[in-house]
């Protein structure tokens, strides 16, 4: 969760304005320093690493009414108990909400370890079991729900601080968010988080405005709960509703800069597809939503743009929130060379920054990407940390870590790091069970392997990827929606060979503007995974099977993958429910549900 090393006081928005250009200039220079230090780095493929991170809620049963609720001191309690237990095998760390905890393996896995996906499943089970074993005596547990159903409703929490129960006017009480529904006290105490909430609100000139469509049921009164604010919608007004969502994110190390750029671009079209496959967030603020996927809720919860910047007719127009689907390709790989693929929204990027970056040897596309990170202002500036230090990367990381795109391009974390260039895949909702999370991890790991070693082209115009992202939010998108995808993803006479990988990814292609219209079709998630004979496309799963056979995976490893992929295929066929459909059906069939879209404590 972002840049947490510094814990000094911070500037509010008005105080920070005088430092904005300075921080950006220093950040650009630190980005240049990183580029110059690591542009020639070339790691061995069999040494590349990857890691996953999962966020959890800390919940408890409320002795007052028996309801299951978030514990507002959850992380504090877990941290205290785990420190005493001296746990091994995973690292736990703070997250945005005071009721949240993030857990990651204590050491990364290897990309080319055939058993790494199995090890990940064991790690997921171990960390959940170990945490719950240590804290069960306190009456708390961790769960992995992409959005906690009753967050923001009356009496939605348990707290050890009686004053939290006594506060009645949240909007007047909350200094940072001014939220009507969630207390500021439910934020991680690290200064980063409250500052981010406050400064986004102050920069916007008003609270964040999150609205998702309300599920229309037989007895649903239009905007029954929030009818005076947003008829027909679920209205939320705090970052807690977005940044309090939980996800599964996976980061992969690349052989070198060009390889990282290729993986970054290949991940972009996959983001919405795997997002739909993972959809697990159908309930917000005690109401059933008419969406299944968390992404846009987080997008709106950290949108720092002013009304003028949202206006397409303004010269200061900023087309997207700082949390959005990725806007552009950065690779010079032949699969992405056609500029017609790079047809996404154009940001008002500083020409001065681009020129500085290109003078240092960055390609046009990479220079545009680095400069685009500085379109948005820094929301967190620490007092005493506004100067330039050529040995640090803090100003660059400040902006890079608060541009939350569907794919994040990650340089090595410090100038003396042994870690390589990395790419983070960020779209997937966390799953209810460890098994489901492990299945998605297995899917991503095999995808990376075929991208690395086969000739597989999943490039797609950015504009179509943006359309896919909206479709991924729809109810039962995994079965009900079709997504734009490349019709033929295998390239060359022998797709099992990747000639560019053999040249250490250094082959670059000149950009072109050839027509692309006939290369893309609308496919279901099932079509993308297993292929569709009528369309004639090759499914990802067929490539996985071919790859495992060619690389002589052990039979037990192939069996594991076949189980995990079989599970996901059943989900894509509608035979196994997504987390969202499971929760939606649970609500709709619950005897206490009044067919009014309200998910109260009894449900």
Image (cartoon, grey):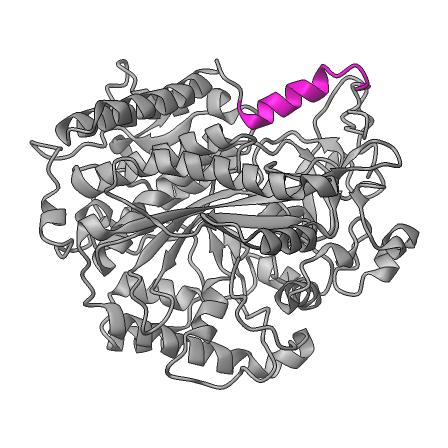
Q: In which quarter of the image is residue 135?
A: top right
| 250 magenta-colored | no
Name the residue located 55 percent from the left edge and 78 percent from the top edge.
20
Q: Where is residue 460 in the image (x, y as percent from the top left)?
A: 32, 40
- Residue 370: percent from the left, percent from the top? 37, 66
Q: Nearer the viewer, residue 88 or 220?
A: 88
452 or 597, nearer to the observer: 452
Residue 360 place in picture, x, y as percent:
25, 76
Q: In this view, does 45 lie above or below 281?
A: below
Residue 484 picture location, percent across and down: 37, 32
Answer whether residue 198 is visible to the viewer in this image.
Answer: yes
Q: How many labels does the image show?
A: 0
Q: Is residue 417 left or right of residue 490?
A: right
Residue at 24% x, 28% y is 544
Q: Quadrant of the C terminus?
A: top right
Q: In which quarter of the image is residue 368?
A: bottom left
Provide the residue span drawn in magenta: 578-594
Depth order, front residue of 293/160: 160
| Membership of 582 in magenta stretch | yes
Rendered position, 323 above or below 586? below
Q: Is residue 167 left or right of residue 322?
A: right
Say if 37 sits above or below 472 in the image.
below
Residue at the image point whose x is 47% and y is 50% from the top: 88
Q: Which residue lies furthest to the left in this view?
A: 493
């Amino acid at each position: 969760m972002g840049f947490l090393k510094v814990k000094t006081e911070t500037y509010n928005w008005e105080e920070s304005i005088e430092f904005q250009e300075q921080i950006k200039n220093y950040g650009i220079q630190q980005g240049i320093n990183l580029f110059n230090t690591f542009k020639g780095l070339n790691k061995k493929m069999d040494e590349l690493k990857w890691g996953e991170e999962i966020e959890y809620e800390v919940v408890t049963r409320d002795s007052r009414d028996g309801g299951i609720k978030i514990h507002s001191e959850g992380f504090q309690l877990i941290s205290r108990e785990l420190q005493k237990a001296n746990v091994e095998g995973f690292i736990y760390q703070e997250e945005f909400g005071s009721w949240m905890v993030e857990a990651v393996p204590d050491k990364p896995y290897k990309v080319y370890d055939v058993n790494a996906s199995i090890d990940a499943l064991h790690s997921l089970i171990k960390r959940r079991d170990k945490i719950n074993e240590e804290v069960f005596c306190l009456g708390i547990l961790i769960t992995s729900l992409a959005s906690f159903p009753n967050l923001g409703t009356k009496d939605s929490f348990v707290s050890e601080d009686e004053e939290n129960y006594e506060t009645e006017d949240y909007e007047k009480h909350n200094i940072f968010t001014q939220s009507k529904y969630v207390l500021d006290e439910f934020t991680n105490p690290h200064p980063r988080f409250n500052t981010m909430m406050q400064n986004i609100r102050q920069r916007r000139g008003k609270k964040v405005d999150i609205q998702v469509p309300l599920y229309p049921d037989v007895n649903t009164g239009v905007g029954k709960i929030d009818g005076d604010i947003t008829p027909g919608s679920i209205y939320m007004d705090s970052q807690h509703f977005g940044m309090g969502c939980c996800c599964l994110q996976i980061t992969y190390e690349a052989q070198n800069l060009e390889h990282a750029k290729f993986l970054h671009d290949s991940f972009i079209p996959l983001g919405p597809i795997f997002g739909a496959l993972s959809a697990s967030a159908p309930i917000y603020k005690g109401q059933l939503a008419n969406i299944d996927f968390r992404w846009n809720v987080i997008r709106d919860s950290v949108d720092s743009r002013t009304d003028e910047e949202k206006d397409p007719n303004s010269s200061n127009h900023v087309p997207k929130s700082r949390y959005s689907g990725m806007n552009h390709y950065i690779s010079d790989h032949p699969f992405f060379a056609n500029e017609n693929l790079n047809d996404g929204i154009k940001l008002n990027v500083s020409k001065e920054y681009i020129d500085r970056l290109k003078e240092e040897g960055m390609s046009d596309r990479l220079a545009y990407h680095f400069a685009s990170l500085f379109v948005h202002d820094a929301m967190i500036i620490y007092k005493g940390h506004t100067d330039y230090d050529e040995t640090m990367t803090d100003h660059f990381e400040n902006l890079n870590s608060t541009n939350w795109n569907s794919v994040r391009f990650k340089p090595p974390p410090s100038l003396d790091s042994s870690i390589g260039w990395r790419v983070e895949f960020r779209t997937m909702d966390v799953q209810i069970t460890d098994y489901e999370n492990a299945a998605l991890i297995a899917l991503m790991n095999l995808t990376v392997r075929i991208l690395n070693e086969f000739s597989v082209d999943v490039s797609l115009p950015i504009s179509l990827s943006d359309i896919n992202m909206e479709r991924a939010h729809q109810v039962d998108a995994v079965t009900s929606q079709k997504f734009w995808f490349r019709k033929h993803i295998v390239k060359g006479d022998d797709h099992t060979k990747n000639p560019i990988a053999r040249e250490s990814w250094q082959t670059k292609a000149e950009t072109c503007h050839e027509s692309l219209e006939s290369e893309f079709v609308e496919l279901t998630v099932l079509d993308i995974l297993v292929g569709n004979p009528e369309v004639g496309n090759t499914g990802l799963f067929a490539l996985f099977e071919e790859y495992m056979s060619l690389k002589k995976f052990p039979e037990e490893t192939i069996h594991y993958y076949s189980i995990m992929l079989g599970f996901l295929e059943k989900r894509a066929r509608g035979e196994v429910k997504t987390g969202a459909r499971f929760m939606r059906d649970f609500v709709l069939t619950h005897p206490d549900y009044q067919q009014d879209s309200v998910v109260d404590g009894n449900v």
